[in-house]
Amino acid sequence: MSASATRFIRRVASAPNAKHLFSSGARSGVPTKNGLLAPAEVVSPAPVNGQRQSNGKASFRRTYSSNSIKVRSVEVGPSSFLKVKMLGKGDVGRVYLVREKKSDKLYAMKVLSKKEMIERKKIKRALTEQEILATSNHPFIVTLYHSFQSEEYLYFCMEYCMGGEFFRALQTRPGKCLSEDGSRFYAAEVVAALEYLHLNGFIYRDLKPENILLHQSGHIMLSDFDLAKQSGHPGGRPATIHQSEPNGIPIIDTMSCTADFRTNSFVGTEEYIAPEVIAAQGHTAAVDWWTLGILIYEMIFATTPFKGKERNDTFNNIRLLPVHFRDTPRISSACKDIVIRLLDKDERSRLGSRSGASEVKQHKWFAKISWGLLRHTRPPIVPAASNGADAMNFRHLKESNSLHLENQTGLRTRASPSTAGYDDGMDMSPGRDLFGAFNSVTIHYDGES
Ligand SMILES: Nc1ncnc2c1ncn2[C@@H]1O[C@H](COP(=O)(O)OP(=O)(O)OP(=O)(O)O)[C@@H](O)[C@H]1O
C-alpha cells in the first residue's frame, strides 16, 4: 500500500475470524443456486453502462425486463484482455483495470486465486458473488459482463466504476462528511439497490462506504457481494403486495421475498454489525436496514455511532448504547428519527422489518426524494473527469514484487495462512471439482453492443 493509501483506514469484514468470540451456533446450510439467470425485476428506469460516455454525460441505454439480459457460454478468456493497472486488493484476489483487446473497452477484472480461496475456505462466497452479479441488472449494482476460470484463478469481468470508491470520496471531503441532503441522496440510492437485492432473495450483509463504488457520473454502484446470502428461494419469493397504506398506494413487501430465512453466520464489518448478529440468534434481511442506519450516521458525522476502543467495546455499545447525536452538524428531527428507527436494536420493530424497502422509502426523511427520477438527479459528488485509463479516482497501489503475472491478468500469490476453524460449507472431499459449480458465462444486456 502506498504512503497516501495508508491515510485511509479500511475496515474489513470481521467474519469469519470474529466468529469464535461468540457462540454463533450452527451456520445456515442454505444452498446457493447455481443455475443460470433468474428473471430480472423491473424496479427503476434509467440504467447506465460505465463505459458509455458522450460529452461527459452517461447514456442510459439498458432496459429492465426479464428478457433484457441474455446469458451465453463464455466468449472470452484471460488472454482476451490487457492489464492496465491494479485498482484494488481484496482478501483473496486483486482487481485490475483491463482493456479488452478486441473492442478496446475498459473493464474492471477481479481475479481470485483458487489456492487462496481453498485455504481461506472462501469458495462458496465466490460462487454466491458470481450468482448475484450474473443475475442482477440494476443501475446501482455493478454489472458483470463475463465470468470464467483458469486452472488457478476465477475471473469476474465487470463494469469499470471510474468514479472510484465512495469511501475515498468521503475521506477527501472537508470534514470527511456530507451534508444531510447529500447523505439523503446516497442513502436513497442504497435503498433502491437493497430493494432490488431483497426482491431477488439476497441479503447483502456488508453495506459500508468501502463497498460502494462511484460511476463516473457520481451515482453509486454496489459491489463486493462475497458476504451476501441467498434465501432458500432462488430468485426470491414473490413479493407480497399490501393495499392498506393510508394513501391507498399499494406497497411491495420486499421482506416477504426473504421471509422464513434466517442465517447464523457471523459476518459483517465490526462497526456495522447488527445486534442480532452479535447475539448469534440468527438474522434476516433486517440487518441491511441496520447497516443503512450506520451508513447515514457515518455520512453525516464522519464516524460510526457505536465505535469503541476495542472490538468488544464496539460490540457492547452496539448491543446496549442508544444512538447519541453530536450537537454539530445540526440535523433535522426527521433525520434523527430515521437513524433511531433504523438502529432499533430489536429487529422486529426496526424500520424496514415489516415490509422492507417500501416502508423505509415512506419515512418522512425521504419525502423530498423522487424515487423514479433518482438516476437522473445530479449527485452531490461528481468525480473528477477521467479518461478511464488514468484511473485518477483510485489510490495508487503498488503491485507487490511477489506477484507473478501470467497472461497479463492472471496472478500468483504467496501462500497465506488459512482461516482456522471456519467452515465454508463446501464439500471438500478429495477428487471433487470444487469450482465445478462456477458458471463461465458472457452476459449480454439489451441495447449494448
Ligand atoms: N467494478 C469495479 N470498478 C472499479 N474498481 C473496482 C471494481 N470492483 C472492485 N474495484 C476496486 O477493487 C477493490 C477491491 O474490490 P472488492 O472489494 O470487490 O474485492 P474483494 O477481493 O472481494 O475484497 P474483500 O476482501 O474486501 O471482499 C475495491 O475497493 C475497488 O477499489
Image (cartoon, rainbow, N blue to C red):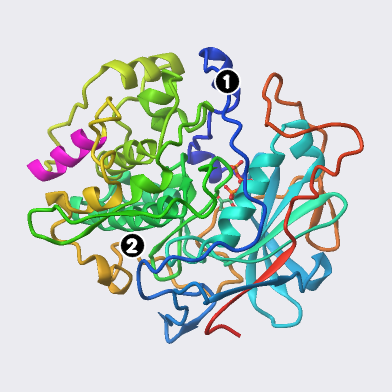
The location of residue 228, given as percent across then percent down, is 53, 43
Q: Give the range drawn in magenta.
A: 332-342
Residue 47 appears in the figure:
yes
> Compared to 53, does 184 lie above or below?
above
Q: How many labels does the image show?
A: 2
Of residue 119 and residue 402, the one placed in the foreground of this image is 119
Q: Mark 2 points at which residue?
A: 381
Residue 51 is situated, as x and y percent measured from the top left of the image, at 54, 76
- Image location of residue 177, percent across then percent down: 29, 46
The secondary element bearing badge 2 is classed as loop
Q: Quadrant of residue 379?
A: bottom left
Q: Mark 1 points at which residue?
A: 26
Q: For this rendering, which residue is in front, 135 or 184? A: 135
- Quarter of the image with the C terminus is bottom right
Q: Is 33 drawn above or below residue 13 in the view shown?
A: below
Amino acid type of the residue tagged 2 in the rendering: Ile
The answer to which quarter of the image holds residue 25 is top right
